[in-house]
Image: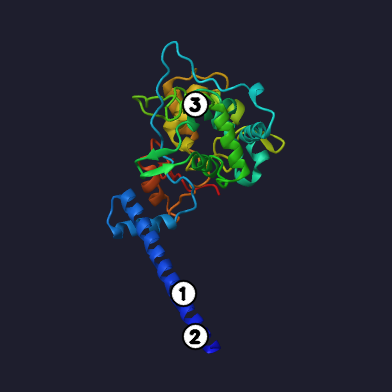
Amino acid sequence: MRDEMTNGMKKIAKVTTSIMATSLFASGLMVSSLMTSVAMAQENATPEIAAEKIAEKSADNGVAMDDQSQLPQAPKIKAGAEYHQPPSESEIPDNAFGEMIRKGQAIFVDTKREVPEYVGNGMTCANCHMDQGKMPNAAPLWAAYVMYPAYRSKNNKVNTYAERIQGCFQFSMNGTAPAADSEAMTALITYSYWLAKNAPTGVSLPGRGYPEVPKPADGYSIERGEIVYKENCALCHGADGLGQKVGDNYVFPPLWGQDSYNWGAGMHRINTAADFIKANMPLGKGNTLTDQEAWDVAAFMNSHERPQDPRLIEGSVEKTREKYHANDGVNLYGVEVNGVILGQGTN
């Protein structure tokens, strides 16, 4: 009787194992099939091409938001209208939510001191997003937050706001991206959410980004830009463009060199830098330079070497330019200037 029971138990175990194996195999097929279908739908491709694309993405360079190309311009504000007004600091609640808002604000204005593990240069978030991320036409957070998740047809991908922030750390900060579920990321997103209070979602608001400055008919001149720089910028950023420090901290950020933004940051585009400069520089005297002066000084600023683009392909500036820079605004990455190919990096 005992032997019969033992044999019966073995048969049940064998059948159970067989069922489990079949079930797992079927589940694996379903997941594999689903992944392939999603990839094919996203890439509009054959199974072979989809497999190649999956392989490309799995062999990624570790950059959270690979596509850093510029977004369409925001609409101009209508006559008599007002820009979005973020809530005042006095309205921050005295609870855990308020503590997270204040933590995000602190990280934003004093980035390297607050989260040194993520920052690889001398920049802070507030260098490009002025007045603590509140100022219209200086890439305010309240206008950026409401535009995510964002679909980009260029790479057929939906990017999250967390990925956008990660991109800032990897490019503008030349550092390391905080994890999407990290406290630093939670704080920055909470701060952005707070600033965007009562703003409509999915709407490109006036004041988002920087106002576009059309390329002058005469193009740009690095030589003229050097003159503009000496007359308007050197006082704060230094004659050598390497910024000014008090102790270990920059009070005016470096515009090129090892401690500045890298070749992947949006500001490396001459047109983007011209937009920012025209609206916001010299500090406290925005819109005093002409369009020509803004383009010239932006070209001069971005004709200097800076840290390498972290998306560098096989150590080749030429390949990296072809994939990421050739069709991304006006920039000098991989271009010969004064007998030197820019983009070699300082790191």
Q: Distance between the residues labelled 3 and 1?
A: 68 Å
The structure residue drawn at horizontal position 33% and vertical position 56%, both measured from the top left corner, is 50
In the depicted view, which residue is nearer to us: 9 or 55? 9
| Type of amino acid under label 1 | Thr
State the image quarter where residue 80 is shown. top left
Q: Residues within 10 Å of mark 3 (few under 14, many from 20)?
A: many
**Percent x, y of residue 340:** 44, 45
Tell me the tag on residue 179.
none
Q: Residue furthest left?
A: 46
Tell me the tag on residue 7.
2
Q: How far apart are marks 1 and 2 (CA)?
A: 15 Å
Q: Is residue 289 visible?
A: yes
Question: In the displayed structure, would residue 106 be above or below residue 51?
Answer: above
| Type of amino acid under label 2 | Asn
Q: Residues within 10 Å of mark 1 (few under 14, many from 20)?
A: few
Element carrying mark 1: helix
Tell me the tag on residue 277.
3
Q: Residue furthest top?
A: 80
Point out the frontmost of discs 3 and 2: 2
Sequence-wise first label, 3 or 1 = 1
Question: In the displayed structure, would residue 309 be above or below residue 147?
Answer: below
**Percent x, y of residue 143:** 48, 28
Is residue 259 toward the left or the right of residue 75 in the image? Answer: right
Q: Mark 1 points at which residue?
A: 17
Q: Distance between the residues labelled 3 and 2?
A: 83 Å
| Type of amino acid under label 3 | Ile
In the depicted view, which residue is nearer to us: 20 or 281? 20
Q: Which residue lies furthest to the right in this view?
A: 247
State the image quarter where residue 336 is shown. top left
Element carrying mark 2: helix
Sequence-wise first label, 1 or 2 = 2
